[in-house]
Amino acid sequence: MDFHSDACDPVTRRAERRLPMRRLLIWSSDHLAGEGYVTDLSMGGLRVTINGPVAIGTRFWVHICNRPACPALMTYYHLAVEIELAVTRWSTPQEMGLQIYDMTWTHEQRLRHLMGNSTLHNGDATWE
């Protein structure tokens, strides 16, 4: 087995279908808060842009916006998916990988719908 292949790399390995995108998200943990962009998403996790590394195992609450940019005052209309618990599995100074552990049934169904009803336009997912 080639230990340098993408199959062994936690940054590129994902069991579920990935959806490339650029959607604003807001995240927070016990000691950190910020915003960034989701660059790919699956039912099990997401890749997020960040400004500096985050410790492996950090627990997050995440709001993903349904558009590339959200208004200053986010309302439920602008919310695509809320993840109540996601945990950092890998991190670089520019991005991190989060594994999804908990979300409400409503948001899980919404994510399933979005994953199943998306189309790619110029490499970015459009949610229908």
Image (cartoon, grey):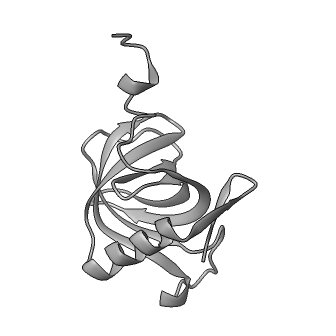
Q: In which quarter of the image is residue 11?
A: top left
Q: Is 122 positioned to the left or the right of 60 in the image? A: right
User: Which residue occupies the foreground of this view, 111 or 89?
Assistant: 111
- Residue 85, x across and y down, in percent: 26, 63
Residue drawn at 48 percent across, 67 percent down: 116
- Residue 36, x across and y down, in percent: 55, 57
Q: In which quarter of the image is residue 128?
A: bottom right
Q: Is 121 positioned to the left or the right of 17 in the image? A: right
User: Which residue occupies the foreground of this view, 54 or 109?
Assistant: 109
- Residue 12, x across and y down, in percent: 45, 34
Residue drawn at 54 percent across, 39 percent down: 94
Residue drawn at 41 percent across, 37 percent down: 91
- Residue 24, x across and y down, in percent: 57, 65
| Rendered position, 37 above or below 75 | above
| Rendered position, 87 above or below 73 | above
Of all residues, the one furthest to the right in this rendering is 122
The quarter of the image holding the N terminus is top left
Q: In which quarter of the image is residue 13?
A: top left
| Rendered position, 80 above or below 48 | below
